[in-house]
Image (tube, rainbow, N blue to C red):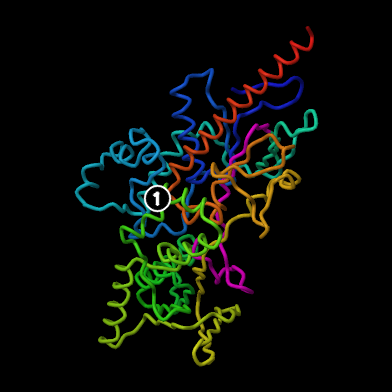
C-alpha cells in the first residue's frame, strides 16, 4: 500500500516503527505473515529504524547460566499464531536442537539461547529495518487543516533520511536507572553493561565488588561475579532483610494472561493500584527461589570453611560513591541504626532497574496533539493507540510505557505476540474506515457536481 508523492516527497509507509527490540521484531513478523497471506495489493507497507548497529537485547546480561523467567511458548509469535514459522520451536528445529531441548524437560531456556532465537527472528525480517539509524524528529504533514502524515527523520552518522508514515509504532524500550547522585564511569557500572565491563578489566584481579539492588539481576550479578573472580569479595547491598522470592505460582501468573490486560484496562484507578500492589511480586524486586537458595548455601559453606567472600549488607542503602585513582568508596548506611560503613572496592555495580523512555520524547510538536490524563500520563486506548486530538489523523501506537493503562505486561515478553496482533488489527480497521470515508467523500462530491 505504499504511495509515492510528486516531486521530492518521500515514499509513504503504512507504518514506521521506532526501535527494533523484541516488541517491534514481533510487529515486523506479524506484518510479514499478514502480507504473505493477503498478497501484494493488500499488503501493509512498513519500515523500522534501530539506533544499534545490529540486533541486541540486554547483551550485557547474557550470563552463561542465566535462564529466562518466561516460558519459551511466550515467544514472539506463538500466542498470536501457534502455527507460525517464526516460533522458538521452529528456531530450535533449524538449529538441530529441538529434541535435545525437549529432553531437558524445562519451559525456561537459557537467556543466551533465547537471545540467539531473537537474532534469528530479527534476521528473517531484516529487509524491513535500517540499523544504525537513530530517529531524531517526527514532523507533522498538514493537509486541509489536519495532520495526514508524519515525516520521520533518522540519522546515521552524517547521513539523514526522511520517511513518511500514516502510522507510527514506538518501541523505544527502557533506560538504565542509577541511584540518585550516582553516575556511570569506568568503575561504576549499571548491570546492563556487566559482561562488556568485565571484559574490559583485561586480566586485572579485583579484590572487592559492591552490588546494589535486590532483584533478579542483582542476585545474578552477585552469583556471577563471585564465580568469575574466585579471589574477590562480593558485597550485596539492599534495603530488604533478604532477597524476596518471585511469585510464579499458577494463579498469580494469570496476571500475565492476555485476558488480564482487558480486566486491568477496564478497572478503575484504585483497583489498578491494588492489582499492582498485590502482584508486583511476580516481577519487581524479586528473585528466582532456586538462585536465592544457591546464594544462601554458598554463603553458609564459606562461613563453615572460614573463607567468607559473600557479604550481605541487608536493611541498608547506598548513600553515595566516590571514585578515586585506585578504586571507589561506597558509603552504605544501616536503615536500622543509621550507622555508616565505607566499603573500598574496585567496582560498584548498580542493579537498580530501568525506567521507561518518554513515549512522546521523539514526537516534538506532534506530542502536543497527544492527550494526557489528570496525572500527566499519556492516554492510551485499548488497542495501544495513543488518544489524540481530532486534528491528528495518524495512529501512534505504544509498545511499552503503558503500565498505567494496560498493566504489568507493558514492557515484558509475556504478552508481546498478542499485543502486536491487536495493533495490526487496529491498523487494518483504521485503513478500512479511512477508505470508506474517502469513498463517501468522493460520492458526495460527485452528487454535488450533479
- Of residues 246 and 322, the one drawn nearer to the viewer in this rendering: 246
* Circle 1 crowding by C-alpha within 10 Å: few under 14, some 14–19, many from 20: few
| Spot occupied by residue 193 in the image (x, y as percentages of width and height) | 50, 61
Left or right: 162, with 191 as reference point = right
Question: Going by the picture, which residue comes out furthest to the left?
Answer: 103
Specify the quadrant of the image occupied by residue 306. bottom left
* Residue indicated by mark 1: 257
Q: Residue at x 29, y 86 (%)?
A: 303
The answer to whether residue 132 is seen in the rendering is: no
- Of residues 345 and 375, the one drawn nearer to the viewer in this rendering: 375
Q: Is residue 89 above or below residue 145?
A: below
| Quadrant of the image containing the N terminus | top right
Q: Residue at x 51, y 84 (%)?
A: 344
Q: Which element type, helix, strand or loop, lies under badge 1?
A: loop
Q: Is residue 327 above or below residue 247?
A: below
Q: Is residue 127 magenta?
A: no
Q: Is residue 56 above or below residue 328?
A: above
Q: Residue at x 68, y 43 (%)?
A: 388
- Of residues 380 and 140, the one drawn nearer to the viewer in this rendering: 380
- Of residues 354 and 93, the one drawn nearer to the viewer in this rendering: 354
| Quadrant of the image containing the C terminus | top right
Q: Is residue 191 magenta?
A: yes
Magenta segment, which residues?
Answer: 163-192
The answer to whether residue 321 is seen in the rendering is: yes
Q: Is residue 142 above or below residue 197?
A: above
| Spot occupied by residue 378 in the image (x, y as percentages of width and height) | 64, 52
Left or right: 218, with 440 as reference point = left
| Spot occupied by residue 349 in the image (x, y as percentages of width and height) | 50, 71
Amino acid at each position: 500500500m505504499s504511495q509515492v508523492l510528486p516531486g521530492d516527497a518521500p515514499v509513504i509507509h503504512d507504518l514506521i516503527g521506532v526501535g527494533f527490540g523484541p516488541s517491534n521484531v514481533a510487529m515486523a513478523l506479524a506484518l510479514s505473515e499478514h502480507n504473505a497471506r493477503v498478497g501484494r495489493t493488500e499488503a501493509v507497507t512498513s519500515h523500522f529504524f534501530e539506533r544499534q548497529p545490529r540486533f541486541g537485547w540486554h547483551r550485557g546480561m547474557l550470563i552463561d547460566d542465566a535462564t529466562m523467567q518466561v516460558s519459551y511458548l511466550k515467544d514472539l509469535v506463538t500466542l498470536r499464531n501457534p502455527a507460525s514459522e517464526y516460533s522458538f520451536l521452529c528456531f530450535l528445529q533449524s538449529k538441530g536442537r529441538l529434541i535435545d531441548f525437549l529432553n531437558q524437560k524445562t519451559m525456561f531456556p537459557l537467556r543466551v539461547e533465547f537471545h540467539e532465537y531473537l537474532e534469528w527472528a530479527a534476521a528473517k525480517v531484516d529487509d524491513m529495518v535500517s540499523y544504525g539509524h537513530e530517529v531524531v524528529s517526527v514532523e507533522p504533514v498538514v493537509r486541509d487543516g489536519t495532520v495526514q502524515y508524519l515525516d520521520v527523520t533518522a540519522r546515521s552518522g552524517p547521513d539523514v533520511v526522511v520517511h513518511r508514515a500514516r502510522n507510527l509504532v514506538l518501541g523505544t524500550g527502557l533506560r538504565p536507572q542509577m541511584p540518585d547522585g550516582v553516575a556511570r564511569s569506568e568503575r561504576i557500572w549499571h548491570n546492563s553493561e556487566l559482561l562488556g565491563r568485565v571484559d574490559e578489566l583485561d586480566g586485572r584481579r579485583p579484590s572487592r565488588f559492591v552490588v546494589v539492588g535486590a532483584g533478579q539481576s542483582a542476585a545474578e550479578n552477585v552469583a556471577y561475579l563471585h564465580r568469575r573472580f574466585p579471589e574477590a569479595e562480593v558485597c550485596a547491598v539492599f534495603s530488604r532483610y533478604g532477597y524476596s522470592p518471585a511469585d510464579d505460582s499458577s494463579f498469580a501468573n494469570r496476571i500475565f494472561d492476555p485476558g488480564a490486560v482487558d480486566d486491568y484496562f477496564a478497572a478503575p484507578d484504585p483497583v489498578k493500584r491494588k492489582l499492582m500492589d498485590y502482584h508486583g511480586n511476580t516481577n519487581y524486586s524479586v528473585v528466582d527461589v532456586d538462585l536465592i537458595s544457591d546464594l544462601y548455601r554458598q554463603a553458609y559453606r564459606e562461613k563453615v570453611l572460614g573463607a567468607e567472600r559473600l557479604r550481605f549488607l541487608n536493611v541498608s542503602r547506598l548513600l553515595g560513591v566516590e571514585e578515586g585513582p585506585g578504586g571507589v568508596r561506597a558509603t552504605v548506611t544501616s536503615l536500622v541504626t543509621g550507622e555508616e560503613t565505607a566499603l573500598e572496592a574496585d567496582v560498584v555495580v548498580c542493579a537498580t532497574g530501568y525506567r521507561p523512555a518518554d513515549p512522546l520524547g521523539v514526537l516534538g510538536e506532534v506530542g502536543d496533539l497527544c492527550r494526557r490524563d489528570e496525572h500527566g500520563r499519556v492516554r492510551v486506548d485499548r488497542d495501544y493507540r495513543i488518544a489524540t486530538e481530532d486534528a491528528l489523523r495518524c495512529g501512534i501506537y505504544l509498545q511499552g510505557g503503558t503500565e498505567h493503562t494496560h498493566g504489568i505486561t507493558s514492557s515484558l515478553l509475556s504478552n508481546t505476540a498478542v499485543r502486536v496482533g491487536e495493533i495490526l488489527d487496529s491498523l487494518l480497521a483504521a485503513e478500512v474506515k479511512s477508505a470508506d470515508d474517502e469513498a463517501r467523500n468522493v460520492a458526495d462530491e460527485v452528487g454535488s457536481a450533479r
